[in-house]
């Protein structure tokens, strides 16, 4: 009888040994509601042309997208400074730095590409 009891105890502690935070139903519902709101507001801004200026609308949508990324990382991916001894947060920071460097470099090259292109009026040459 004690053998089956020890076997049951071994299985109950198996998933809690890693120290990673686990989500609750309340956390998942909160994340879902925030995600729906952060998706519906930009949709409403575009469909009703609320801001009138397309550049301002694009900036506001990008801001909502950034907030939604943070909501997903906190509520669904459970990323925090406590998870995995802080290594997941360090990996995230490194990834963000690399992505920013790659995107800003690509945008810089594409923006200045026009000066290095051949002229479109070849008959003037």
Image: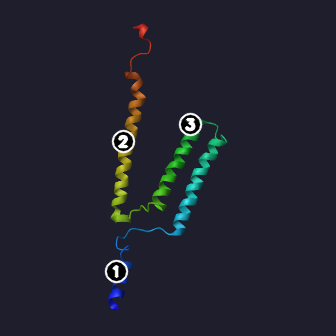
Outermost residue on the bottom side: it is: 1
Task: Tell me the quarter of the picture where residue 61 sits.
Answer: top right
Viewer-nearest of discs 3 and 1: 1
- Position of the N terminus, as image quadrant, is bottom left
- Position of the C terminus, as image quadrant, is top left
Q: In the image, what residue occupies the spot 38% across and 68% down? A: 20
Q: Is residue 114 above or below residue 42?
A: above
Left-right relation of 65 to 108:
right
Task: Tell me the quarter of the picture where residue 12 sits.
Answer: bottom left
Q: Secondary structure at mark 1?
A: helix
Task: Look at mark 1 in the image and give the residue it sits on.
Answer: 10
Viewer-nearest of discs 1 and 2: 1
Q: In the image, what residue occupies the spot 54% across and 68% down? A: 26
Does the CB distance between marks 2 and 3 fall below 8 Å? no
Measured Cα–Cα span from mark 3 to mark 1: 58 Å
Q: Is residue 118 visible?
A: yes
Foreground residue among 27 and 3 = 3
The tag earlier along the polypeptide, 2 or 3, is: 3
Q: Position of residue 45 (x, y in %)?
A: 63, 44
Q: Secondary structure at mark 2?
A: helix
Task: Tell me the quarter of the picture where residue 58 sits.
Answer: top right
Q: Position of residue 38 (x, y in %)?
A: 57, 52
Q: Position of residue 31 (x, y in %)?
A: 53, 61
Q: Secondary structure at mark 3?
A: helix
Left-right relation of 96 to 65:
left
Q: Is residue 87 above or below residue 2?
A: above
Task: Look at mark 2 in the image and give the residue it sits on.
Answer: 101
Q: In the image, what residue occupies the spot 42% across and 68% down? A: 21
Left-right relation of 8 to 74:
left
Task: Look at mark 3 in the image and give the residue it sits on.
Answer: 55
Does the CB distance between marks 1 and 2 fall below 8 Å? no
């Amino acid at each position: 009888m004690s053998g089956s009891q020890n076997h049951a105890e071994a299985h109950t502690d198996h998933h809690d040994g890693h120290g990673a935070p686990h989500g609750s139903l309340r956390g998942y519902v909160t994340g879902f509601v925030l995600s729906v709101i952060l998706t519906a507001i930009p949709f409403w801004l575009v469909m009703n042309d609320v801001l009138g200026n397309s550049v301002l609308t694009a900036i506001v949508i990008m801001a909502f997208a950034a907030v939604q990324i943070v909501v997903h990382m906190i509520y669904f991916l459970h990323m925090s400074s406590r998870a995995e001894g802080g290594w997941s947060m360090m990996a995230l920071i490194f990834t963000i730095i690399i992505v920013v460097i790659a995107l800003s470099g690509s945008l810089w090259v594409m923006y200045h590409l026009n000066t290095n292109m051949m002229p479109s009026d070849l008959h003037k040459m």
